[in-house]
Amino acid sequence: LTLSSEQTRGASLGMLMGSSWRLSDFGKLSLLLQHQANLASLLQTLKAYSHLVGTTLAVEIVTHKQLSIIQLHLNSESENPGRHRIEVGITALLCLCRHQLGKDWKPISTHFSHAAPNSTHTYRRVIDSEIIFGSNFDGIVVNNHDLYLPKPEYDSRMEEHARAVMDHHVVNSSPMPMDRQVRDTIQSLLPHGRHSISQVASALGYSIRSLQRQLESNNTNFQKTLDEVRTK
C-alpha cells in the first residue's frame, strides 16, 4: 500500500480500500455479526472471535463519562505499521458502525496517530465528521447512547442459531493466547492512563485473580507484560 501510494502521489489508498468494506468481508464471522442487538454487542463479538479475522487486529472500547473510544490497534513486527493499514482498519470499523446504526451515522470524531497527509479530501469524503491527526490513538469517538442503541430487527433466536453454527465450525480454531490479549489491551488503554490490572481485567471480562492465573499459566505476569509494552 505504501509503495502504491507513493506511485500515485500520496493517494489515501487505505481510505479508499476501507470505504468499500462490507460486512461479508469479515468472512464466516459476518453471519454472527449481522445478528447483534447493538453496536457494543457487535464489537464485543468481533473481539471474542478476532482470531478468525486475523491476529493483527485488536479493538478495544474505552469509556469515559458520556463518550466511548472505539480504539484500533494493529499488531505488527514493525513499530510503525504505516498509515495505510491504519486507514483500512479505521474505515472498516466505520463500515461496521454504519451497518449497525445506519448508513448516515457519523462518529463524534475520528482520530489518527499519524500526521495529516498533503491532501485530506478522501478522508473528509469517507468519514464526513471531525478528523484529528497526530492523536495519541487510532480510533473513533462515539456517544455511549450509540453503543447501546437497539437494532429494531434484532432477533435473539437468530443470534443463538448463528452463534451455534459459528462455534460448531470454528471448534478447531485457536483463540489468541492470553498474554497476547493482555498485551494488546494494555497497548490500547495505556494512552488514556487506564492500564491498571483491574482496568485491564475488566476490559477482558475477567476478575483480577482469574487474569493473574491465566497469565501464570503462560509463564508470565501482569507487571512483566506491562513493562514489555512500555519498553516496546
Image: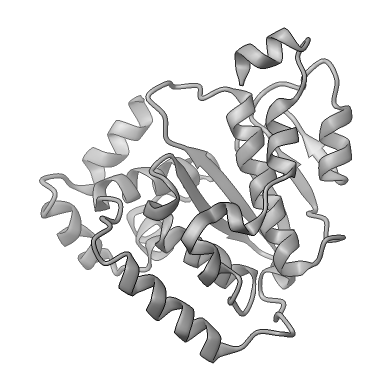
* Residue 143 in sight from this viewpoint: no
Q: Quadrant of the C terminus?
A: top left
* Image: 30 above or below 167: above
* Image: 184 above or below 121: below
Question: Where in the figure is residue 101, as x and y percent of width and height?
Answer: 76, 68
Residue lying furthest bottom in this view? 157
The answer to which image quadrant residue 210 occupies is bottom left
Q: Is residue 60 left or right of residue 8?
A: left
Q: Quadrant of the N terminus?
A: top right
Question: Where in the figure is residue 10, as x and y percent of width and height?
Answer: 75, 14
Q: Is residue 156 left or right of residue 78?
A: right
Q: Residue at x 66, y 15 (%)?
A: 4
Q: Residue at x 68, y 47 (%)?
A: 21
Q: How is the image coloured?
A: one colour
The answer to which image quadrant residue 30 occupies is bottom right
Q: Residue at x 73, y 34 (%)?
A: 15
* Residue 161 in sight from this viewpoint: yes
Question: Where in the figure is residue 217, as x and y percent of width and height?
Answer: 11, 54
Question: Where in the figure is residue 204, as x and y percent of width and height?
Answer: 38, 62
Q: Nearer the viewer, residue 194 or 232?
A: 232
* Image: 199 above or below 17: below
